[in-house]
Image (cartoon, grey):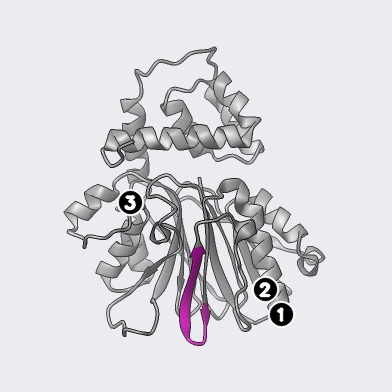
Amino acid sequence: MCGLYGFSDPYGSLGPQQVRQLVRALAVSSMVRGTDATGIAYNSKQRLHIYKRAEKASDTFLFPPVGTRAVMGHVRMTTQGSAKFNYNNHPFPGNLDGHRQGDGPDFALAHNGVLTNDLTLRRQLRLPKTRIETDSYVAVQMLETAGTLDMKTLVELAEQLEGTFALTILDRHNNLYFVRENNPLCLVEFPHLGLFVYASTSEILQTAIARCPFLSTHLYSRVWLEEGEILRLGSDGQMETSYFNTARLYESLYGFWGWQANKPCYGKSHDASDLLDTACNLGYEEEDVAILLACGYCNDEIEELLQDPELFRAALQESYYEYAMYRGDYTP
């Protein structure tokens, strides 16, 4: 469980101090989803910059420079690849065909979720070896191999990934892409400002907006991102959408759950639909609850964890490690 956040301000409606206040509000509000690392990507002086640190958002210097029109951010809860090595943290830089050395990266990518076939893809596609251990980085390598960043290549990328994911990508021209599988992603538009703001959940977004007086008095509307949807927010404020097939996601998840089917489960069990409804109402992801169920936690146990976000986070992280050991790419 990690957090995505950011904004697109194509018409420059926000002043420098407002940009910095909004970025900090989004990052700090997103800390409920991860405190192991924090990072942002933004364009300045015709170059894409990435700033990230292995520390929680409240301790991180997040001040985009004057003239910043878009920011893509991430807070991390480590599941694969130690956060103390900053190259394992998000956002990740990527370069496309025709890249000129010294110009900075062509795009930056951030991911919320867990990819279950990253090692398989690296072998099958013969991707270059890298010191980066994070499963998310395979998406960067696949885009680099494709050599272009557009709706077609993003559809092809998304349909090869297995696991759970929501991806955000910022290119060097201030185009912001959203690729949503089944992980949550909440995007809103302030029509009078021409401003778009997003975070992983609506609760985080509402908290961040409330911390920004210059936004809290403006009306905004939800831009719904469906499961399997790709949305491009252009640097000119225009939107473009496309869709991809989500079948591989459920094949991979059901395969994992099948592996766990015979694990012992203690405590009273009842219909999981009520549990999932409760979890969603409290701001948790349905997919995270499913992972706990798959790793042997019963409904009653999970209901207790839902009342303590720190205990829930610890149990979820342990479950991710168990899955990683099952895949053979993590050794305790």
Q: Do the CB atoms of the residues marked 1 and 2 lie less than 8 Å apart?
A: yes
The numbered mark at residue 51 is none
Frontmost residue, 81 versus 114 = 81
State the image coordinates of residue 107 (x, y, percent, origin top left): 41, 72
Q: Residues within 10 Å of mark 3 (few under 14, many from 20)?
A: many
Q: Any magenta on residue 266?
A: no
- The image shows residue 110 at horizontal and vertical percentages of 45, 60
Q: Is residue 51 magenta?
A: yes
Q: Which mark is residue 161?
A: 3
What kind of element bears circle 1?
A: loop
Q: Amino acid at mark 2?
A: Val
Mark 3 or 2: the one toward you = 2
> Looking at the rendered structure, which numbered label has been put on residue 19?
2
Magenta region: 43-52
Looking at the image, which residue is at 25% across and 49% down? 119
Q: Which mark is residue 15?
A: 1
Among numbered discs 3 and 2, the one appearing first in the sequence: 2
